[in-house]
Image (spheres, rainbow, N blue to C red):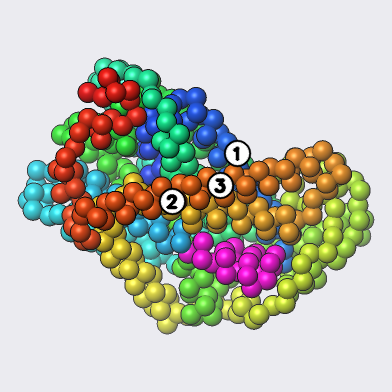
Amino acid sequence: MAGNDDALCVALLFCATFGVGSMSFGSIFAAAGPVLAAMGVYFISACNLHASVAVSKSLIVAPANVRTFSDLGFFAFGETGRRVVLLSEWGACFLSPIAFLILGGTTLLPCLFEGTVAGDQWSPTHWIIAMSLGVLPVILIPTLKAAAPLAYMGGLVAVLADAICIGYSLQNIQPSPRETQIQTNNAIQTFGTIMFATGTAIIIPPIQRQHTDPARLANLVSLTLLFITSIYMLIGVVTYYQYGCTAPATLLDQLPEASSARKVASALMLVHVAIAFPLLLNPTLFDMERYLLGKDADHEVLQQTLSLRAAKAAAASGQSKPILANTGAIGTLAPPRITSSPALEEEGFLYGNSTPYFQATSPPPSDNGDHAYAGEAYTASDRMCSGLIRTITVWLQAFLAIMFQSSFTDILSFIGATAVTVSCMIMPCLCYLRVHPIATQTSRGKCDRFVCHLTIISSVVLGIYCALLAIGNISRDLQHFRLFQAAETNMAVNTTLVDEYPYCHEGERN
């Protein structure tokens, strides 16, 4: 069973992380130049990996009824922590799929139906509505575990779409690389886009809920994110080699509009978007359904996890090595029992061992009753109410997508710089420092603590700067274009060579 759970969690993580954001790495390298872009992608990916593993290890230390990221925030910092996590988590999980709807409605679907009656007569607004209807069947799948086959497909089609775009360009388009004119604003603005593509800590709790032995997840997260970062770097380097500073905003934009390769790649990416949509929305849906219905959608996996923990605790009851997942840490939000074991400091790879360097008393917030219903099963009426909640959520997202379809790029940057940064970088590290004891007297512990503080400080500085720039860009667009206006009409307004290739030197923008 552990092997099946491992494959499922890797597929869910890969599908939720790798996809739409991967198509923008050519533009990232064009904006910042190959050296700065590679350094930025590596640094942000390393911080994101550390934060993602920190969430996983913090959930292992916490009691079993700490089920969500907001529960972890409450366990670490009380009600303030819960509210901060909820606001940032809901912002990231609710706003990111809106960008998916905009991409599908303004680029993917119009490309697929170009030359048809619908393609000639429908505006991006109509396509966004169609896109929202298309994702509903996947949204209504009750649990992530039930969507496992789709997760495998979602990751595969995303890789195929990128491979088709890059392969077609290398084979049919003559390389014309031009050196980027490096500017501070252009380079720093890529932070939001990179965060949108790499931010994963927020989806670690729902993925960890699908694994009956969550202690195995830390290594899986590390290896999966390293593999994804390698693909991102490859896409950026190859695209910059092909286009240089003239690289388009996405890989799809570099293909001829009438080419079959563009249609196939658009269809594959559309399938990925439809599958990844509920994965990113899951943390918000889980919190809403637990609050409104009083039920835990993943209660079956929870029961298996508790049984496995009890078996491990019973098997190790005669040993001196402490077991964090003991029965005293399952029923309530009480801190685990203190047991010292100096040998723990030499055990395990930094990201592979979920046991802290030494055990200490965790923060003791009281249970507010959110977990009393964790073992209750869903009824037929609960499923109907759950479907209604999910449908209303998608309709609201479609409404916002229609309203803000003119600022797709700025929305991506703003989401990455604010909600994703707080929920995927800052709060995971803060919770980890609070919940997971670190042996600061060892070099490994000092490095662990230093990386957490470096991640927090850099995320705050870059996030604030990019958020201000994104707000300025969105305000500028809203002054020129009305809300609910179709995105296609925005392209016809005073396009200059500077607008088309803003990252090139002045004499090379043609």
Taking 57 as reference, is 313 left or right? Answer: right
Q: Picture coordinates of residue 386 (x, y %)?
A: 42, 75
Amino acid type of disc 1?
Ala
Rendered image quadrant of residue 398: bottom left
Residue depicted at 48% across the width and 30% down the height: 37
Amino acid type of disc 2?
Leu
> Mark 1 vs mark 2: which is more N-terminal?
1
Q: Are marks 1 and 2 in contact (CB under 8 Å)?
A: no
Residue labelled with disc 2: 468
Task: Give 446 or 314, whichever is nearer the viewer.
Answer: 446
> Mark 3 vs mark 2: which is more N-terminal?
3
Q: Which mark is residue 461?
A: 3
Rendered image quadrant of residue 330: bottom right
Q: Picture coordinates of residue 41 (x, y %)?
A: 51, 35
Residue depicted at 61% across the width and 57% down the height: 427
Q: Magenta segment, which residues?
A: 69-90
Residue depicted at 68% across the width and 67% down the height: 77
Residue labelled with disc 1: 46
Rendered image quadrant of residue 169: top left
Q: What element carries label 3?
A: helix
- 386 vs 326: above or below: below
